[in-house]
Image (cartoon, rainbow, N blue to C red):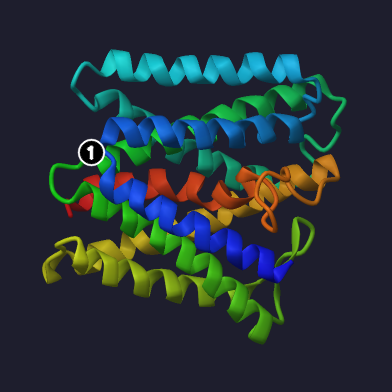
Amino acid sequence: MTKTRVIAALIMAPAAICAILLLPTQWLAAVVAIVCLTGLWEWFKLSGIDDSLPRTVLVALNLLLMVLLVWGSAGSLVLFQICTLIGVAWWLLALGWLRFFNFGANQSDGSARAFKLAAGTLAIIPAWASLVLIHASPTNGHLWLLTALAMVWAADSGAYFAGRHFGKHKLAPRISPNKTIEGLLGGLLAGLAVAAGFGLMAGLDMAHLPGLLVVATVAVLASVLGDLFESLLKRHAGAKDSGNVIPGHGGVLDRIDGVLAALPVFALGKEIFGF
């Protein structure tokens, strides 16, 4: 399984990097929309929508929302900025949801299912909009998007290795028993180091470095929140993975859960601190 995971990662990572660096924003938005909607398909299944037809309709409605955002933007990114703010607000609410673990645990409860379905849209659409917003930045937007994603990837890997070697204190045992506070700290350090390195490569001046580190800190913590929330959905659904699309990695949602929460935070922080 480890060998399969490594091979899959060696294929996915270069493909993602090439897409970020080489594709124009509109084409990257289309490619990422496919990835995000695949993750949303898995999200809806975890939320209790087992039948393919209702899930297809729901995913199609979210695709329509993406199309309307592009159509309504008319050369302006204001709508994408509003979506980014909505995404940040949603993840603050999600933090409270994690506090009440049993909320929505009954998969047959229609109201709980409705909340989870809405949560899927509130997670996926703003993350996609934030990615477009970052990539469309007038100065090295492609490098800034690579910085945001590399930061999350590094934090995830750092948390894994730090938790494996030093982890003793559980972070959220009811939601994700394997996550530890030591892993969180290790991931945070790795994420900050990568954010600083890639940020300088993207043209960051030293005067803006403290701002980037503040944004990176919050974004890495947000990525952990995204990971934990997906774990909550899987706990409620009694599932180990969100799917089996990616060999050795599970589903698409298993790979992008942290990114979904980190991107709106990074995009908003980038606007606030002006780097």
Q: Is residue 199 above or below residue 88?
A: below
Determine the image quadrant of residue 80.
top left
Residue at the spot 40% in from the left edge and 61% down from the top edge: 150
Residue 212: % across, % down: 27, 62
Residue 246: % across, % down: 65, 49
Q: Is residue 272 above or below residue 224?
A: above
Left or right, 169 with respect to 31, comes to right
Q: Which residue occupies the foreground of this view, 46 or 218?
A: 46
Residue at the spot 80% in from the left edge and 48% down from the top edge: 235
What amino acid is labelled 1 in the image? Answer: Ala
Residue 173: % across, % down: 77, 64
Q: Which residue occupies the foreground of this view, 52 or 188?
A: 52
- Quadrant location of the N terminus in the rendered image: bottom right
Q: Which residue occupies the foreground of this view, 184 or 129?
A: 129
Residue at the spot 59% in from the left edge and 42% down from the top edge: 94
Determine the image quadrant of residue 202.
bottom left
Residue 42: % across, % down: 68, 35
Asked whether the viewer can see residue 184, the reply is no
Q: Is residue 119 above or below residue 201?
A: above
Q: Categorize mark 1 by other alpha carbons within 10 Å: few (<14), some (14-19), many (20+).
A: some
User: So how many labels did they put on this image?
Assistant: 1
- Quadrant location of the C terminus in the rendered image: bottom left
Mark 1 element type: loop
Residue at the spot 53% in from the left edge and 20% down from the top edge: 62
Asked whether the viewer can see residue 237, the reply is yes
Left or right, 192 with respect to 183, comes to left
Q: Which residue is mark 1?
A: 136
Left or right, 105 with respect to 171, comes to right
Left or right, 7 with respect to 27, comes to right
